[in-house]
Amino acid sequence: MLKKKEKYVVAVVGATGAVGNEMITILEERVFPIEEIRLFATERSEGKRLKFKGDDIAVETLGEKSFEGIDIALFSAGADMSEIWAPVAAKSGCIVVDNSGQWRMHHDVPLVVPEVNPECLKWHKGIIANPNCSTIQLVVALKPIHDAVRIKRVVVTTFQSVSGTGKKAMDELLRQTTDFLNSKEIKSDVYPHQIAFNVLPHIDKFLENGYTKEEMKMVNETQKIMNDNSIKVTATTVRVPVFRGHSESLNIETEKKITAAEVRSVLSNVSGIVVFDDPGENEYPLPIDAAGKDAVYVGRIREDESVERGINVWIVADNLRKGAALNAIQIIEKLIY
Amino acid sequence: MLKKKEKYVVAVVGATGAVGNEMITILEERVFPIEEIRLFATERSEGKRLKFKGDDIAVETLGEKSFEGIDIALFSAGADMSEIWAPVAAKSGCIVVDNSGQWRMHHDVPLVVPEVNPECLKWHKGIIANPNCSTIQLVVALKPIHDAVRIKRVVVTTFQSVSGTGKKAMDELLRQTTDFLNSKEIKSDVYPHQIAFNVLPHIDKFLENGYTKEEMKMVNETQKIMNDNSIKVTATTVRVPVFRGHSESLNIETEKKITAAEVRSVLSNVSGIVVFDDPGENEYPLPIDAAGKDAVYVGRIREDESVERGINVWIVADNLRKGAALNAIQIIEKLIY
C-alpha cells in the first residue's frame, strides 16, 4: 500500500513516448504533489532531456536498482517492458500503474477506471492496470446507464486515431498525407496499409477467432472493470486518419427501457462525462474538439427502434488523456487523496 | 416500357457532378450500346464540353422539350431537379433512372439493386429509383445471407467518403488538408465542421427522432429493396476523411445459425461480391483499394458471441460506382439485355 506523504517521488517509464509525454504534462497541469520526477526510457533515448516544471530532467535507462526511493511508477513502455520491470518496481515497494496490456487480465491485478470501479484499488498488490484506451471511454459512458437500467449487450464500432499507436504513427500519417499532396509514392512502415485518406479495420494482432486483440480487449476488459460477465460486448475496431481522439459508435441493449431523454439526464450528472448532444445546432462530439480535453463526450443519443429496449450513442474522448495518461494519474490521485 | 433497339439515345442529367462524370465513364467502359449521348447540367455549366468516346459533347441546360428523342435518362442532379424533371422525362416516353432521394420511397417507383430485386423492374411506370449509396452496398451483402438464414436485425455504422457529398466536398478535404499542413486557418463551407483529420457523425439533415436522413434511408430503403419489413435496421452514419469508397461495419442477427465459414461460402458465389478476408495476410477490404472497382468487398467475417446467432462483417464499395453510377447503369442493362 502507498504510504501517505506530503509529496511523492514519481517515475514515468516510457517518458519519451506519446503517452509518457502526456503523463508528464498532466502531472504538471494537475499540480500533483511531486517531490521528484524520474524519467525512464530505452537506450535509444539516452542523453535526452525533458522539461518538467521548468527543469531539464535527464532521461535514464532502467536497471535493477532504478526503483529505489520511488513511490509511484507510471508505466507506458509496452507490454514487454512491463512484463519484466513492473514486478521489479512493485517488489521494491513502488506502486505501479501500468498502461500496457501485460497485467490487465491478471486475477491479482485490479483494472481500474476511477469513475467506474474505484473500490478495486483496495486490493492491489503493487501493480494496478490502466485499461485499454478504447475500453476506458466505453465503460465511463456505460456505467451510469448500467446502474440505471442494466446493460445486456453492446455492439461497438470504433474510429481510433493514430496517436493510439504512438508517435511514429502520427509521423506516418503526416508524411503520407504530405506525400499524397505532392503526388509522391506513399510508403507504410507502422501500419500494414496506407492510413492517409483511408480507414483500416485492423488494430493490434489478429487472433484465432478472427477478432483482433483490440476487439477482444473491449470485450474482456469491459466485463472485468464493470465486474459483470453478463454484459455481452462485440467490437469492430477501426483506425482512421485522425491524429488524436477516439470515437465510438455504440448500440446498447438494456434490460429495462430507457428513453433518449433519460440517457441524457443520467449521463449529465456524472463526473467525467460531458453530454454534447444538440443535432439541431450541429453539436455532437468530434475528435478534433475532444483532443486535449479530459472528459468523455457523449452525443447522438437516440432510441433504437430495431430492438425492444435499445439506444444508440456516439462517444469521443482524447485517447492519450482519459484513454491513457489522465486515467493513470486519476488512479494515483485516488490513492493519495 | 423500353422498346428494344440496337442502340439508344442516353441522357445524363447532372453530367458535370461527381456521379454524372462517373456515369459517362462507365457508359464508355462497359460499351453500352449508345446511339447518341446527351449531357445536361444547370446554367452554371453552360458552355462546358465533356469527352465521350473521344468526342467533345456540349453540356445543355434542361427545357420542356429536352427529352424528345431520348430513350434513357440517368438523373443525378439532386432531389429538387428530379422532382421537377423526372416526370417530364417519363411523360415524354423516356425511362428515367433517378439517383436522387426524391422518388425512392414512392409506392409507384421501384427501388432497384439488380443483384437483389431485379424483378421489381417489371412494374416501373417510367421512373426507376437508384438507392442511396450506403444502402446499395449493404443490401448486396445482406441478400445472400438473408436467403440462406433470414436476417432479423442489422446494426450498421458507416465510414463514408467525401465524394458521397460531391466534388465540392472532395475539394474541401483537399484544401483543409493542405491548410492544416501549412498551419493555415481551416475553413469549412461544405460541412458544418472540419473534415480533414476528423470524423463527423452527421450525414444529411437531422430528423425529429434524432437520426439523420441518411440513417433513416438505410432503414427504409433496405426494407423496400429486400421487400421485407421484418428486417430491422438501425444505423449510425459517419463522414470520414477519405476521398472515395464507403466502408460499413455490420452486426447481423439471423434467424438460423450461420458460421463465419458459411457466410464466406455463401457470399463467394454471388455476382457483385468479392470476399476479401484473410486477416493473417492483412487482407481485408479498404476504401483505397475499392475505389474505381465495381464489386462490394466483404471481409472481417466473424461470429458474434454476444448473441445467440450473430455475425460481424466489414464491407467496402466505391460509392460513386456501385453506390451510384454503376448501379444505375446495371439497371438499364437489365432493361435492354
Image (cartoon, coloured by chain):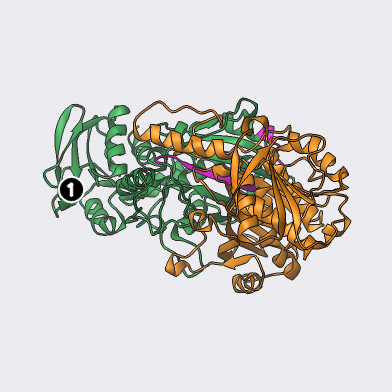
Chain colours: A green, B orange
Q: Which one is in front, B92 or A18? A: B92
Whether residue B72 sits left or right of residue B154 in the image: it is: right
Task: Locate residue B260: give its quadrant.
Answer: bottom right
Asked whether residue A259 is drawn in magenta, I would say yes
As shown in the figure, which amino acid type bears the numbered disc 1? Phe
Give the SS element for disc 1.
loop
Residue A106: image quadrant is bottom left
Whether residue B107 is visible to the viewer of this picture, yes or no, is yes
| Residue B162 inside the magenta-drawn segment | no
Residue B91 placement, left or right of A134? right
| Residue A32 position (above or below residue B332) | above
Instruction: Tell me if I can see residue A256 in this picture.
Output: no
Looking at the rendering, in which quadrant would you find the N terminus of chain B? bottom right
Quadrant location of the C terminus of chain B in the rendered image: bottom right
Occupied quadrant, residue A24: top left
Q: Position of residue A294 (x, y in %)?
A: 42, 32
Q: Position of residue B95 (x, y in %)?
A: 81, 50
The stretch in magenta equals: A243-262
In the image, residue A40 sits, relative to residue A330, either above or below, namely below
Pointer 1 residue: A67
Say which of B128 and B263 sits in front. B128
State how many labels appear: 1
Residue drawn at x 36%, y 53% is A186
* Chain of residue at mark 1: A
Image coordinates of residue A185 in percent, x first then y, are: 34, 53
- Residue at figure coordinates x 50%, y 62% from the top left: B284
